Image (spheres, rainbow, N blue to C red):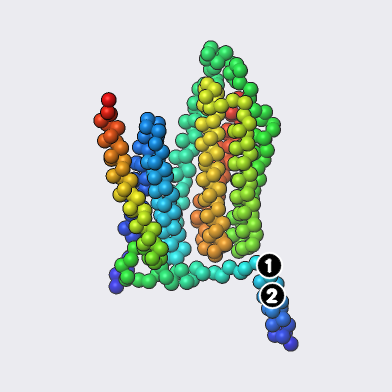
């Protein structure tokens, strides 16, 4: 019987990278087909394939770590590096949209009236719902830290409660932001103001939803006894991601909502 | 005497908890046993049983059909009908 002479994880052959790649192909081509030929079938098929891939791939990671014990300290270190690098790439993604915002708002063109906010744009009051949203996300940062400490201290019930509260706050943010989008006196088509506002806050909102889903999976895993007080990297990764989402919002709030109003 | 008190406490806890919510048992050890069956050659994505195989086949079927469909649409888009 062969045993590996190292602490690393040589994964079983897996079909999910292929199905994921095809899903990306279908989603992107489907987008083009939707734009030109008004059919959404390809794009929807791609999205379904993406969801199936994500579910099965991450299910397999849980099996490999929690049920098979492959996540030794060196493997966990690699996973940490991976998550940090991924979040770094997301930081650069948002940096682009902030660049676009500052490019347009620091030197507003004559077409905008030479001022920022541009002529004719009624901005949102930064001290109303946006300030509430800031409080909601900051509070969720506290509750997720509470959850982490609860897990580390073996407090099962408290971990479940604080994690649930974090997710609830995330959903509350999304709900408030959706209401703001509906009630806003300007749209994405309202010049560069509209574009920078909705693309930057829109991608942020998408990341809030992704983060909430990640935390929800962690809640299910916590309920099912997957996490130990010493080993709960999945939760840590979700918490890192959540803090990142919170920090992006703070930059959005200061730049676009407050300075930009 | 102490054991008698302990038994009463256990019974009280049992009846209280069953009236509050259903208890979730820790099934991780069973899962660990299932997935640590060695030398069966089954890869992780199929090791859970029939449900795994069904989900895999559905996903792969959609992948292959999707690939065919996208090639068809792209060829169609590349040769526009006047």
Tell me the tag on residue B15: 2
Tell me the element at label 2: helix
- State the residue at coordinates (36%, 62%): B53
| Residue A73 can be seen, yes or no | no
Tell me the tag on residue A44: none
Between the residue at mark 2 and the residue at mark 1, the CA separation in whole angstroms equals 9 Å
Tag 2: Cα neighbours inside 10 Å, few (<14), some, or many (≥20)?
few
Which one is in front, A203 or A162? A203
Q: Chain of mark 2?
A: B
Question: x, y (%) of residue B55?
Answer: 39, 58
- State the residue at coordinates (39%, 44%): A46
Tag 1: Cα neighbours inside 10 Å, few (<14), some, or many (≥20)?
few
Q: Which residue is mark 1?
A: B20
Decide if residue B1 is on the left or right side of residue A104: right
Decide if residue B72 is on the left or right side of residue A106: left
Question: x, y (%) of residue B43?
Answer: 34, 63
Decide if residue B62 is on the left or right side of residue A112: left
Residue A221, above or below B71: below
Residue B5, above or below A35: below
Question: x, y (%) of residue A27?
Answer: 39, 40
Which one is in front, A180 or A139? A180
Question: x, y (%) of residue A108?
Answer: 54, 17
| Residue A107 can be seen, yes or no | yes
Tell me the element at label 1: helix
Which one is in front, A127 or A92? A127
């Amino acid at each position: 019987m062969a045993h590996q002479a190292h602490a690393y994880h040589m994964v079983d052959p897996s079909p999910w990278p292929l199905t994921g790649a095809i899903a990306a192909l279908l989603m992107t081509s489907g987008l083009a087909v939707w734009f030109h030929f008004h059919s959404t079938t390809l794009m929807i098929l791609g999205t379904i394939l993406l969801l199936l891939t994500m579910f099965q791939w991450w299910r397999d990671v849980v099996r490999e770590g929690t049920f098979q014990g492959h996540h030794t300290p060196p493997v966990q270190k690699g996973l940490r590096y991976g998550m940090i690098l991924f979040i770094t790439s997301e930081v650069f993604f948002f940096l682009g949209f902030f660049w676009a915002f500052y490019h347009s708002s620091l030197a507003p063109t004559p077409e905008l009236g030479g001022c920022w906010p541009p002529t004719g744009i009624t901005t949102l009051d930064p001290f109303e719902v946006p300030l509430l949203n800031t409080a909601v996300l900051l509070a969720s940062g506290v509750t997720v830290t509470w959850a982490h400490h609860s897990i580390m201290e073996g407090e099962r019930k408290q971990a479940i409660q604080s994690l649930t509260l974090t997710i609830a706050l995330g959903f509350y943010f999304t709900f408030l932001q959706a209401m703001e989008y509906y009630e806003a006196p300007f749209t994405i088509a309202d010049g560069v103001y509209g574009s920078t506002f909705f693309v930057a806050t829109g991608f942020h909102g998408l990341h809030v939803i992704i983060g909430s889903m990640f935390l929800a999976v962690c809640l299910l895993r916590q309920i099912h006894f997957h996490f130990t007080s010493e080993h709960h990297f999945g939760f840590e990764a979700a918490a890192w991601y959540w803090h990142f989402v919170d920090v992006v919002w703070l930059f959005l709030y200061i730049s676009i909502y407050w300075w930009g109003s | 005497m102490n054991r008698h008190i302990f038994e009463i406490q256990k019974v009280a806890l049992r009846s209280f908890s069953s009236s509050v919510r259903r208890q979730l048992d820790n099934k991780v050890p069973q899962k660990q046993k299932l997935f640590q069956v060695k030398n069966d050659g089954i890869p992780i994505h199929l090791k859970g049983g029939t449900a795994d195989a069904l989900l895999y086949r559905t996903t792969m079927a959609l992948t292959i059909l999707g690939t065919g469909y996208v090639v068809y649409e792209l060829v169609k888009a590349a040769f526009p009908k006047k």
